[in-house]
Image: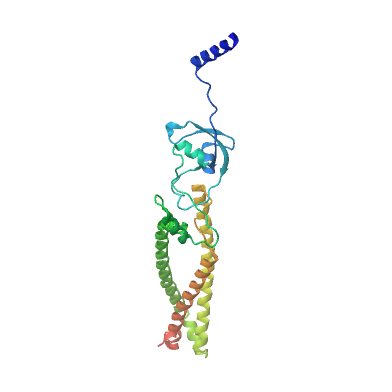
Amino acid sequence: MRAHRLRLWLQALILLIIGPYPATAQVAEVAVERQLADELGLAVGDTFQLGAAVDSQSRPAIVAAIYEPTPDPAEIAKREYHIRLHLPDLAAMLGAPDRVDRFGLGLRTGVSPDTASAALNRSAFGYRVHSSSLIASGSSQTFLVVSRFHRAIAVIAIVASAVFLLCIMLLKVEERRLDAAVMRFVGVRRRTIFGALLLEAGLVALFGSVIGALLAYMASAATNSYYRRFFDTELTFSAVTPKIVLFSVSLSLILGILAGTVAAWRLVRTRPMVLWGRG
């Protein structure tokens, strides 16, 4: 009995001197974004202090995984880093249990997102349900403006290139005046001369479009290489798709043939003596 009282007295004395034994804090497991892990020098298994503010980093956390985020154009310029926590750990760190800002719902195949969001919005108050397509449309307005701006630049460039191509073809045909006069003198028909000039214009346009496509591929590769290294991401900043190449080649052939048609028609309608410089 005396030994038991002595042990209790000693324990009470220790508590008065050094305080209670610290309880082992629950360690939160987090997944750290790769860019943040590289900047802080973190690896899987490392521990650090976690908190909702700089002056309240008192919750221990361990790096359970390092993940590569999905490339997102809306996030690339914000320079924000993210970590992922289990929901109970996040609620405990924020001191706001049973509260969320937003969460996602997955629907079964065949269920309309608009119908589901309308039904959920009618069922209760205090929240608002939006379909993912509506959210994506709202967050991509900036990219739509940029896309329209690029489209306007492309239209201006196409019109300017068409005028430039027509001038080149007219100058090139003017250099063939003597050749056309000689062919007319020896009995070559206008149709034959017109077809030859038109074929030459088509070949020039095709050759130019091929060179342009190669330059576009090289410029796209250089753009992606620079900005991927600058932003440390795998996001594709420039893409030259087969559809774009096909459209560009087709447009180049159409403009080249039209310019060649105008120039050739102007040449074959001129009298041979005028072409020879005697008329």
**Residue 11's x, y, as percent?**
54, 15
The image position of residue 272, as x and y in percent, is 45, 88
In front: 10, or 185?
10
Is 54 or 173 nearer to us in this picture?
Answer: 54
Which quadrant holds residue 278? Answer: bottom left
Total numbered circles = 0
The residue nearer to you, when weighing 253 against 48, is 48
Q: Quadrant of the C terminus?
A: bottom left
Q: Residue 155: image x %, image y %?
A: 41, 68
**Image vertical order of residue 199 relative to residue 9, above or below:** below
- 16 w.r.t. 126: above or below: above
Name the outermost residue toward the front. Answer: 1
Residue 85 seen anywhere in this rendered image of the structure:
no
Instruction: Name the outermost residue toward the top.
Output: 2
Query: Is any atom of residue 267 visible in this view?
Result: yes
Check the image and report above or below for 272 versus 234: below
Q: In which quadrant of the rendered image does the N terminus lie? A: top right
Q: Where in the figure is residue 134, as x and y percent of width and height?
A: 43, 58
Q: How did the renderer colour the structure?
A: rainbow
Residue drawn at 59 percent across, 12 percent down: 4
Decide if residue 233 is on the left or right side of residue 134.
right
**Depth check: 219 or 192 in front?**
219
